[in-house]
Image (spheres, rainbow, N blue to C red):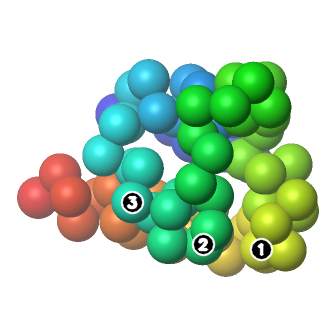
């Protein structure tokens, strides 16, 4: 499985786990195709949207794990 960390680029996450899109959208990250998202890390995106990156990372990994089941 693709490992996601706080330094993983959003574009890489969506390339390897496109099913993650709703998790990003649920916290207000709707511009996943914009130029900023392609070079932004998960941590940077979380800070830009006022979201705790550690909590979002945990939630995202749990979401993806449940999606795979």
Q: Which residue is mark 1?
A: 51
- Figure label count: 3
What is the distance, in whole Å, between disc 2 and disc 3 at their CAs?
A: 9 Å
Q: Position of residue 15 (x, y in %)?
A: 44, 23
Disc 3 vs disc 1: Cβ atoms closer than 8 Å? Answer: no
Question: Which mark is first along the chain, 1 or 3?
Answer: 3
At 35% from the left and 37% from the top, the residue drawn is 18
Q: Which residue is mark 3?
A: 22
Q: Which residue is mark 2?
A: 27
Q: Position of residue 34 (x, y in %)?
A: 68, 31
Q: Position of residue 16 (x, y in %)?
A: 40, 26
At 33% from the left and 56% from the top, the residue drawn is 64
63 vs 20: above or below: below
Closer to us: 42 or 36: 36
Disc 2 vs disc 1: Cβ atoms closer than 8 Å? Answer: yes
What is the distance, in whole Å, between disc 2 and disc 1 at their CAs?
A: 8 Å
Q: Quadrant of residue 50?
A: bottom right
Q: Is residue 30 visible?
A: yes
Closer to us: 22 or 57: 22
16 to the left or right of 53: left
Secondary structure of residue under mark 2: loop
7 vs 22: above or below: above
């Amino acid at each position: 499985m693709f490992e996601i960390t706080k330094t993983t680029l959003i574009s890489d996450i969506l390339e390897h786990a496109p099913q993650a899109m709703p998790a990003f959208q649920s916290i207000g990250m709707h511009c996943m195709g914009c130029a900023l998202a392609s070079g932004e890390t998960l941590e940077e995106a979380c800070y830009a949207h006022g979201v705790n990156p550690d909590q979002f990372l945990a939630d995202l990994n749990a979401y993806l794990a449940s999606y795979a089941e």
